[in-house]
Amino acid sequence: MSSELDAAPMDTEPTFIPTDYQLRVYDVAMKRNSIAVAENGDENHKIALMMIREIGKSLKNNDGDKRVIAFLVPTVHLVHEQYTELKSKTELDVGEYYGALGVDDWNNENWEKEINEQDVMVMTPQILLDALRKAYLSFEVFCFVVLDECHRATGNHPYAKLMKDFYLNSPRRPKIFGMTASPLIKKGSTEQLRVLERVLDSQVYTVEDRVELEEQIPFVETKYKFYDPIQPPDLEMKEKLESTWAKFDAVLLGLRKLLPSQFKDTDDKYKALLDRFANDHTKIMFCLDNLGVLCAYEAVKVCMENVPKVHEECDLYKESLGHYELFLQELLSIIEGSQDNKKLLKVVTSGSDALAAGQISSKLQELLEIFRSFGEDTEVLCLVFVEQIIVAEVIGRVMKKITDFYHFNISYITQSNSSDGGFLPKELEVLGSFRGGKVNLLFSTDMLEEGSHVVKYSSVIHFDLPKTVGSYIQPKRRVCPKNSQYIVMIERRNTKQMDHMLHLTRSESSMMHTAVKRVSNDSQLKACSTNEVLSYVVDSTQASVTANSSISLVQRYCDKLPRDNNMTPKPNFESVMEGDQYRCKLILPPNAAFHTTIGPAASNFHVSKQLVCLDACKKLHQMGALSDHLLPLNKESSQKDSTMNKKALTSGAGTTRRKELHGSIGIHILSGTWGELEDVTLYAYKMDFSCNIAEQKYSSFALLLERKLDDDVWNIEVDLYLRKKFVKASVSSCDQIHLDAQQVVKAKCFQELIFNGLFGKLFFKSSGLRQFLLQTEESYWDSSNMYLLLPLESEDMATDPPLKINWTGIDSCVSTVEFLKKNARLNPQQSETIDGNSSARLSDTVNNKYNSDIIHLADRSTSADSLKEMVVVAIHTGKIYSILDIVENISAESPFEANTDGSYSSYADYFLKKYGITLKHPQQPLLLLKQSHNSHNLLVDFPNAGVPLSKKRGVGKNVVEKPLYRAHIPPELLVGTDITTYILKSFYLLPSIMHRLESLMLASQLKEEISHHAGYCNISSSLILEALTTQRCHESFSMERLELLGDSVLKYAVSCHFYLKNPKDHEGQLSSSRSRIICNSTLHKLGTDCKLQEYVQDCAFDTRRWTAPGQRSIWPSPCTHGLDTREVPLESRFFSEDIKLMLGKTCDRGHRWMVSKTISDCVEALIGAYHVAGGLTAAVRLMKWIGIEAEVEPSLIDDAIKAASLHCYAPKAKDIDILESKLGYNFSTKGLLLEAITHESEPGEGVGYCYQRLEFLGDAVLDILITCHLYENHRDVDPGELTDLRSASVNNDNFALASVRRNLHPHLQHSSLYLEHQISAFVKSVSGMSTTTLAPDTQGPKVLGDLVESIAGAVLIDSKINLDVVWKVFKPILSPIVTPDKLDLPPSRELTELCDSLGYFIKERFTKEGDVVHAELKLQLKDVLLDGQGSGPNNKAAKGMAALQLLEELKARGIKSSKRRILESDDADHSLPDDNTCSLRQSETFGSAPKRHKSIKSEQEGDGDVSKECSKTEIPVVPPIEMKKEGPRTSIKSEQDRDGDVSKECSKTDIPVVPPIEMKKGGPRTSLYSLCKRLQWPLPAFDTKEQKSRFIYIYTCI
């Protein structure tokens, strides 16, 4: 609705003082059902408003059943008027309802919601009638019904049907108040009044005293304006015009005979063109006869402007349109005649001169004189009623040529073409302008006779006589009583017109007299006699359809059937005579639930048509094609119903925007019940590690578990990627191993020491003091995560089981723990005396002389040679180190290297002041130690792993390797162990290998769960793990490939199931059923019901969060979600759309945020995994476990074949044989192939089929076949490229090309000339094409793609669901199937990806001219602005053509995509020169075109120069930004042009505005990129430098 309408309410006063007339009518209407008659319609509306306010009070106070008020208006445009009126003048909740709001597709829940929320419902009677018929509403819910313009309640009008079919049969009838200015429609028939009263169950009421009424309600008298009889036009001109029409009519009829008879669609279209041709001729001649030459001339130009546009019609139709245009041009030249006539037509004289010159008729001259009588008053508001649309158009054009009428703003509203009876947007705009005063002279047909009471006109003129009493009386009520005119124009001495007007005025008086008489008599109202109406009622809902409404329901059913651009499904009717009785044969489209039926006999054809439609409605409902509310069950309605009431949700289940909190499941197999005081027998698995550098040795380990692992869990090899090398880890199963209680205690102590020392903290602060972790009573062993990781003896690397655990090393670690419990230097205030039995202390007090052969550790003295590769623990920090070497020239007495401020004079001084330790052997050389470090995710294959850093591709010479940390510590502060660095190095591998094993255990756990319900399938746990892993994990595998496959498998299985199970469903219903099952929201629900979300791996392995049994986490993540369990309920409080949420990161209870769509993807990936492992059978069994029915019963296949065998193919036998030879397949059931090639437009007796159902099936068949082919043959292709391959292979264009290449298209059976032309044009366009890719502006006809798909579906059914047979047939047809090296991306995408690599932005703009869209793409390079333009039928095609032009321009400049560069040479040196780097430093300002690292091959020289039009001093510069608390701002104005393009002439003052910058993480970078995009600057590159401070570590480059 236009803003003008909303801006002009009826009355701004919230209250008004009622007149005596209004009060009297109000009192009567509150007591009984009444029909208020008043020529001034405002009076009735004010009475209705008074009643609504009063009755509305009871609605607000009523605590019982909810009842509402219905305000019914006859047309849609009045709905909004009354809605606005009631909304502004009452305190009630008001709703408006009409078809454009989607009300026709509402369901029961929608209507119940409106009943509960609204007090007043403003609607058209048809909306209410439909809702009553569908049993969504009943009259019992209404307490008061207002009927505006109630005189329409006659015949088959919705008002009459509402009252007769529903109101009079209602057990609880609402109060009725009818309003009309004239209860009469026909002239002089007072019987209408009595009939109207009976139908509305109401009595007419008006004031008896006419004088009294006129005193309270002033009336406008009618003025008659007489014009002289119209003189006939120039006979010679008229004869020429008629002769021209006859000539062109003969030509068009002759062309029609040349049309092929079998093409029904074009015949209908051509008939419409002939009708248009005749109608235009009639309009022009009418204007010539009644308005004059000038109006006839304008009428021709109006017709020329409205000539149909040529699209893809056949040549004969195009030729006919050409003749049609020639006809209009010839008429124009005839009317123009001589040069003098041309001047007369261009310059219109005023007054009698125009009449004398023959420009206008006497009738039009009189109208112009009336307009002149208004003077130059700009406040005039005049409405002119005309009978024909063309009159309204041409008079306005003529008046604009006359200078006398410059003060008139003229427009017109004619018959609306809106489907719901309302105004079109353009008409609404005109009406709004009229009400707002922008238009003051409005021409209209009779559509504005009623309603529009919000506008008061100063004048109403009937240019043509009103036809009925209503047409005469209704417009009067909107004329202002003061200084207003109501004018009727009559021809002088025309007795017929005068008698007509006399009859209308007498009928008006008679009507008022009868109404007054009935009021005075106050007679009892007779009951309305309702004839028994034939109907069908649904027992469960009481929805009904009558014989009268059955035709529209059948038409609506057909309208909802699947269609294409070439054929609109509609019912056809044929008359069958049986004696003097009529029977009607109904023929439904081929894709309907049934095809033909013959109805009962009737006295006339119209009644027989109603009866056959009533039978058809009953049959359609019984077959399930109509719902219990008698609505078509189809794709559109089901989708609308399913999405209704969800408009408030911006994102739902299965979408990427919605994030959900989910729990994670524990790994059952890791749980253990063994304790410390008992013996235990554990399953043992050996871990071996082999490095690609032979000199690098790693100790083997044993994994000890209480439960046995599945074979496909432990039998793995994993590549672990380290710095400049990689290690292959392998796991093998060994015999069970028995541990006694003492060994269990030692093993647990060993594990606690090493894992906490390496990846945690042995010393931690508590209450301000440091404590030794293993000295506390707290246990870090959890029964849900119980296993041991123990080192093996080195000789076991080459021996067979049983395993030999390195108990020597374990015992030494136990001793170390005991030593640390007594001697750990926890706090600086602690005594410096070291207790214990260490040999190092026995001689320290005696001899401090340094012996170079003996090194004194904290717990022992040992030879220098034995220290090499020893693992030690520092008593002052609890850190674990490995000894690299003895630093002979540095002792504790040496100067302290990291002494930046002179605080420490030596190392000994440092340890004394820092830790309170007095060294007893300060002369000993310090030990060079390799510090322990955090574990890393070694599962990630970093680029060029194992290759020396200096040789890595793409690394410039300025890259500096990170240093390794080394430490110098006195030996006496270290506790020695008997484990070596070979064992220690293996510990860094364990988190990654255990993470992989734990993931496989989880996958195996899910496999066991599925097998328990769906049966055994020989599927590996690694494949299931792939289906559970997202790309966010950064693994070498992810679910994307399997998801792509599973999507096709799911689509195929569900399609087969529905196709065979529902043989009567058309393609729309099948597609709807399939969509409901395979949509992401359904998959999400099914996945969460199976708790798949708890298994999903959605985050990269974070080694900091991983803890071994006995390890205390130093990276806790407390749960803040308010849950005490691992499981998270599916509640809205755990849903979010916050884009800043950390996805995948788990809290300590296992909760993590996850994208909702991930669960849907996981379901599809699991389906794909089971299909890979066990074929379609395994996948279907998995679907059944998930909750998807996709099983196919063999009997249903036989039924489908049997049904197709009934198709009569004999007339097409030869054509079918030829087609079979092209396919290389002989059908056992020829009817299947016949059905596959039959278009819905193909006529024929008994042809109740078309290819749409088979096309639905074939679409899924080709999808799964091509996807499986690509999946199997391109295993090394990443998921994104695999998706591109499938998109390039599975699309309508590709199938259409295959149809033409294999010459299948001539076998399509159809009867559409438009379709024939479309196919022929496509065949011609691709006949000489050298590539297999269509240009963006060329699209394959959908029908050709459908043909290939339907044939595939037919082969599948004929082969009894054998995909191998289908692939054998269709692989040659679809070949060559695209491969990665032949993959051509769409131009738009290729350009986008290329510009992303270049760091440039693209500006796009679209304009539409008719049916053609024009696209303009602008690309700012560093030295030139490129402009690409293209056009096409839609935005996508136009953008594609423009992108193609830009790609060619870039290619000419030597710029190629990175993909092509890599394909050309993989060995090229891709390092960038030093001067190709752009660095941004804090002190620098930002220029207009910073350089960027490029992944493209360019032949340009001197890139990076500023635009030629701008000098370097004129580059827009962003000044330094003040970093205030509220964020950076600037106050500089920007003169950027409307399109956002960079100005060709730069000015120093044209500095771009920098909006407030978000100072959180990534905020400044985002703001900078946004600025670049807005100005089309290239993206900047960053040259970063890292600096670290040194403490006691030595940085060494390796």
Image (cartoon, rainbow, N blue to C red):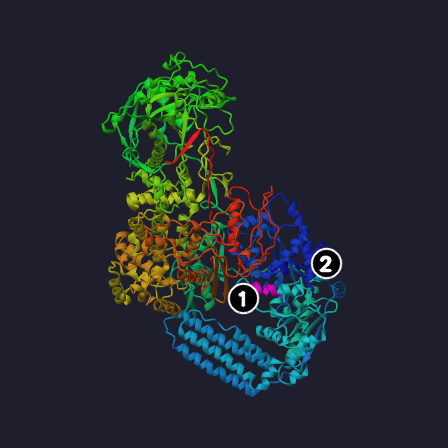
- Image mark for residue 1528: none
What x and y, as percent, mark residue 972? 40, 19
Query: Which is more toward the observer, 834 or 237?
Result: 834
Is residue 1332 depicted above or below 859 in this figure?
A: below
Relative image position of residue 268 (x, y in whole percent): 43, 71
Which residues, given as a range, are shown in magenta?
A: 421-430
Q: Is residue 1268 above or below residue 1232?
A: above
Q: Is residue 1516 left or right of residue 1269?
A: right
Where is the N terminus found, in terms of image quarters?
bottom right
Image height of 1553 relative to 38, above or below: above
Q: Quadrant of the C terminus?
A: top left
The answer to which quarter of the image holds residue 586 is bottom left
Q: Residues within 10 Å of mark 2 (few under 14, many from 20)?
A: many
Label 2: which residue?
Answer: 22
Residue 447, horizontal then vertical, whole percent: 60, 67
How far apart are the alpha carbons under marks 1 and 2?
A: 38 Å
427 in magenta: yes
* 887 displayed left or right of 547: left
Of the numbered discs in the image, which one, if any, rests on residue 417? 1
Magenta stretch, main secondary structure, is helix
Q: Does the rendering let one see residue 1109?
A: no
Which is nearer the N-term, disc 1 or disc 2?
2
The disc labelled 2 sits on which kind of residue?
A: Gln
Q: 582 or 1352, which lies in front?
A: 1352
